[in-house]
Amino acid sequence: MFDRRILLTTVAGLFGLSAFRWLRASPAQAGEKAAQKFEIEKTDAEWRAQLTPQQYEILRKEGTERPGSSPLLNEHRKGTFACAGCDLPLFSSETKFESGTGWPSFYQPIEGNVGKTEDRTFGMVRTEVHCRRCGGHLGHVFDDGPKPTGLRYCIDGFGLVFHPATPSAT
């Protein structure tokens, strides 16, 4: 009886792990993004050398940060939020808003600087957003944002760097 329980538990665990991996993996999405050519392409070793471990996990491995952990969540100065991988300006501070999600949120990216890919991980269909220049994963976009766009770009703050606006000389 004891051996049967161990066997059944092991089989159930392996089945659950396989199901999780199936829901997590999306060959179509991985192939779609991998087939894209980006202006900046580096080897995995080059990305690891350039980025912090947390930036690497987010930008190159499509990870996410713990909600509320990014210092950029509370960044309210005027300026530009750029890709931490290649410094391409992605979002203006004027489009940032408090979504209450624990991640920096914007209602609109800078025109032409953010790409989109269908994301079917975890059994959901979402729209992943990435830097159009280096392909770095930024987060996801949802249709529950404020006017004027109605969109919420939910962005991993550790995938961004902030450049404050320079004070104008008057």
Image (cartoon, helix red, strand yellow):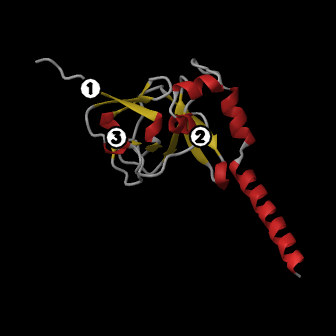
Question: Mark 1 or mark 2: which comes first in sequence?
Answer: 2
> Mark 2 is on which residue type?
Glu
Seen as rendered, the residue at the extreme left is: 170
> Which image quadrant: the N terminus?
bottom right
Task: Name the disc covering residue 165, or none.
Answer: 1
- The answer to whether residue 27 is above or below residue 33 is below
Q: Which residue is mark 3?
A: 96
Q: Which residue is depicted at the point 69% across and 29% down?
A: 34
* Left or right of residue 153, residue 162 in this image: left
Q: Nearer the viewer, mark 3 or mark 1?
A: 1
Q: Which residue is depicted at the point 75% across and 52% down?
A: 22
> Mark 3 is on which residue type?
Lys
**Can you give x and y, in whole percent of width and height, for residue 145 in the image?**
41, 48
| Residue nearest the observer in this picture, 5 or 99 | 5
Q: Quadrant of residue 73?
A: top left
Packing grade of label 3 (10 A; few <14, some 14-19, many >=20) is many
**Can you give x and y, in whole percent of width and height, for residue 164 in the image?**
28, 28
Q: Which residue is mark 2?
A: 62
**Can you give x and y, in whole percent of width and height, for residue 124 in the image?**
63, 53
Task: Name the disc covering residue 98, or none.
Answer: none
Q: Nearer the viewer, mark 2 or mark 3?
A: 2
* Left or right of residue 30, residue 130 in this image: left
- Which element type, helix, strand or loop, lies under badge 1? loop
Cα distance in 3D space between marks 3 and 1: 14 Å
Q: Which residue is depicted at the point 54% across and 26% down?
A: 132
Question: Mark 2 or mark 3: which comes first in sequence?
Answer: 2
Q: Quadrant of residue 5?
A: bottom right
- The answer to whether residue 96 is above or below residue 101 is above
